[in-house]
Image: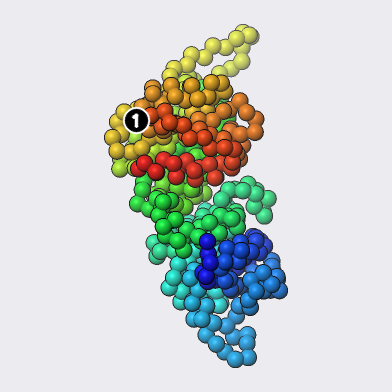
Amino acid sequence: MLNGKRILLGITGGISAYKTCLLIRLYRKAGAEVRVVVTPNALKFVTKLTLQTLSNNDVYIEQFDIDEYKPEHISLTESDIFVIAPATANTVGKIANGICDNLLTTTACAFNKPILIVPAMNNNMWSNKFVQENITKLTNAGFNILYPSEGYLACGVNAVGRMREPEEIFDETVKILNPALKSSQNLSGKKILITAGGTREKIDPVRFITNNSSGKMGLALAENASNMGADVTLISTFKSDGSYKNITVETAQEMEQAVKENLKEQDCVIMAAAVSDYRALNYSENKIKKTSENELTIQLTKNPDILKEISAISSNAKIIGFCAESENLLENAKTKIKNKGCDFIVANDISRKDIGFNSDENEVYIIDKNLNINHIEKDTKQNIAKKILEKVFEQV
């Protein structure tokens, strides 16, 4: 797939630098010539000899550490693409602001062909407003950004900041160097609204009704849609560290209001949130005290059916709903898409313990309004999110 292509791989000083060893092998196995330029700190995580052996080329570190000076930053720009993975917050900031204080950043400044930046850092660093401003600057300048995923970080937390896997970086490189492949998954110019998480319906100041939704599916959809170039608005019951617009809500009524306020001009709305069907009819301003009675009756009332409402009022946007069922999965999903009036239903079986709520994996069926069924076998929610978007936008 990369036969004859010349890839310049930039490695900076992050713990995920070790993954680039596999990335080099993937590039070379696909027929590419690979040259590597590193920052000095990168060599604290992976050795020069390893990189030389895998790439079968010299490793470039500094411009002035050779006896006979040559403008390496210019000769390196003869490559077809410059992939910087991992890209630390420090390097992202330097490139975004034209700072050229090492060979890697100097080469990036002189490089006039596609550059793919693959950030990796602590989640707090990734969400820092200055880092996000730098990412936005690079995106607006035409850089390709492969956003970090959620996962276990070196600091010991599960959060957004993890470098994408070598296989994902390889796939993105192939798409950039082969525009015909990239065009089918390019959502640039598309506006997508996505909901995520489980709503909370308050009973009193300390109690509420909710469900087991973790929001991972909706978050994966938002991340993938953003990575594919879409203008994403995520309405969720949790705060996201992504570089897209994020509106946080708590209740079904708040989600309804936020969705309707942001519905205009959307190309697609994906209702991945688990919205509570009922809420307490009478909210108690004070904590309900335990009494001597053995029973407590709480009267419930229906929440708005957001999916059905927006399907009725939106004439332009594709509307996608989700269907979590514990029995008769396909039959219930088909009934739901007829009743709701949406364009697609994504159905999954919540009776299984290995997928669905709170899991990193899922298995789903995508059903369109003509009741055609597309089965996506068990996979990570990140990969399933990408496949859902690809399927939906086949017809947009």
Residue at 71 percent across and 74 percent down: it is 49
Picture quadrant where residue 320 is located:
top left
Is residue 278 among what the camera can see? yes
Picture quadrant where residue 381 is located:
top right
Residue 335 drawn above or below residue 87: above
Q: Give 86 or 97, whichever is nearer the viewer.
A: 86
Residue 117 position within the rendered picture, expressed as x and y whole percent measured from the top left:
51, 63
Is residue 108 among what the camera can see? no
Identify residue for label 1.
311
Residue 85 drawn above or below residue 227: below
Q: Is residue 281 left or right of residue 49?
A: left
Picture quadrant where residue 36 is located:
bottom right
Residue at 39 percent across and 61 percent down: it is 140
Residue at 39 percent across and 43 percent down: it is 394
Q: Give 105 or 82, whichever is nearer the viewer.
A: 82
Residue at 67 percent across and 55 percent down: it is 154
